[in-house]
């Protein structure tokens, strides 16, 4: 089975993240017709689509991914909240330029207007050195080569093979507060150096750093995921859209528990300077399964 076009196509310097909630009193045929129009091929743009639990049960009642469930609110031991606003459909559109991406945005928005309400519309971008708004390089720890497939894609022989569990969260940065820190203090928050992008090691790695809280093993299995989010922003609202793909939804849950200090009371220092605004889980079916469920 083949992952959806766009999952591994990089860099995708421009992106758009569109989240939708379905309107009421729709037929399955209404939804499938709109989705077929939305994902029609457009040159130079990738249009990937993923479905929340409620939408999945409507368009594909014959089977469902084994771990797919709604995102639920999480609260850290320090009172930080990862809110849940589970949505029904995610479109992740990306290409090399805004000119490549915009026709796909228009196609999706026009196709979806009759069946769903747009609840999130964010434009994402990448810098040449992959730095986010805080000035740190993002995605250094992402799996490379074939390891991307192992981390991101449900393996053959399992239900939903070729598909991926998906986590999407909008994070806003408390940028003035973060930049008031000295660079060494910023590096302690992140767990890597700012200019040279070198990960701290051993005793030098703060246990509450972002790297320490997210690069974890459970029962000797690394909780690796494949991240494709980007910075987003305008003059009044800026941050990171966190978009990640995994072969198991439980990988997200273990990392979230670690960030929130569920087991040891140590919370991710990054959450002192960033607020989660949204949270949804979806499943992105393989290219073959997507074609099948939209034509069944």
Image: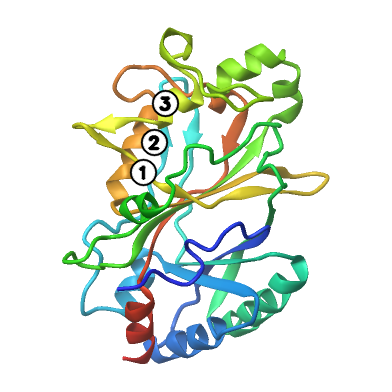
Q: Which residue is drawn at 30% across and 56% down?
A: 69
Q: Name the residue under label 1.
A: 252
Q: Is mark 1 on a helix, strand or loop?
A: helix
1 and 2 marks in contact (CB < 8 Å): yes
**Cα–Cα gap, marks 1 and 3:** 12 Å
Q: Position of residue 152 (x, y in %)?
A: 36, 54
**Comparing labels 3 and 2, the label whose residue is closer to the camera:** 3
Q: Which residue is drawn at 32% across and 86% down?
A: 292
- The mark nearer the N terminus, 1 or 3, is 3
Above or below 145: residue 158: below
- The mark nearer the N terminus, 3 or 2, is 3
Q: Name the residue under label 3.
A: 213
**Cα–Cα gap, marks 1 and 2:** 6 Å
Q: What element carries label 2?
A: helix
Pointer 3 local density, CA inside 10 Å: few below 14, some 14–19, many at least 20: many
Q: Position of residue 160 (x, y in %)?
A: 26, 68
Q: Which residue is drawn at 35% across and 70% down?
A: 285
Query: Which of the 4 image quadrants contains residue 238?
Result: top right
Q: Where is residue 84 in the image (x, y as percent from the top left)?
A: 45, 48
Pointer 1 local density, CA inside 10 Å: few below 14, some 14–19, many at least 20: many
Q: Mark 2 points at which residue?
A: 256
Near-viewer residue (100 or 276): 100
Q: Position of residue 240 (x, y in %)?
A: 62, 44
Please identify the quadrant where the C terminus is shown.
bottom left
1 and 3 marks in contact (CB < 8 Å): no
Q: What element carries label 3?
A: helix
**Cα–Cα gap, marks 3 and 2:** 9 Å
């Amino acid at each position: 089975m083949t992952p959806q076009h766009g999952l591994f196509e990089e860099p995708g310097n421009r992106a758009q993240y569109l989240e939708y909630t379905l309107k009421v009193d729709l037929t399955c045929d209404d939804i499938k017709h709109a989705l077929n129009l939305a994902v029609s091929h457009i040159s130079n743009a990738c249009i990937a689509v993923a479905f929340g639990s409620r939408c999945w049960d409507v368009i594909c009642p014959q089977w469902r991914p084994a771990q797919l469930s709604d995102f639920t609110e999480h609260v850290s031991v320090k009172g930080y909240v990862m809110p849940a606003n589970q949505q029904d459909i995610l479109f992740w559109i990306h290409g090399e330029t805004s000119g490549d991406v915009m026709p796909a945005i228009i196609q999706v928005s026009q196709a979806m207007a009759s069946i769903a309400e747009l609840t999130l519309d964010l434009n994402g971008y990448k810098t040449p050195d992959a730095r986010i708004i805080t000035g740190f390089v993002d995605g250094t720890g992402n799996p490379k080569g074939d390891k991307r497939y192992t981390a991101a894609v449900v393996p053959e022989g399992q239900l939903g093979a070729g598909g991926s569990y998906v986590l999407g969260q909008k994070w806003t940065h408390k940028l003035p507060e973060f930049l008031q820190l000295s660079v060494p203090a910023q590096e302690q928050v992140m767990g890597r150096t700012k200019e040279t992008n070198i990960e701290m090691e051993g005793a030098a790695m703060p246990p509450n750093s972002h790297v320490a809280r997210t690069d974890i093993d459970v029962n000797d299995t690394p909780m690796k995921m494949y991240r494709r989010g980007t910075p987003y922003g305008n003059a009044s609202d800026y941050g990171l859209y966190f978009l990640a793909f995994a072969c198991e939804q439980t990988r997200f849950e273990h990392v979230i528990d670690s960030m929130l200090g569920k087991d040891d009371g140590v919370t991710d220092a990054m959450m002192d300077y960033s607020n989660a605004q949204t949270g949804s889980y979806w499943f992105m079916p393989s290219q073959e399964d997507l074609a099948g469920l939209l034509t069944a």
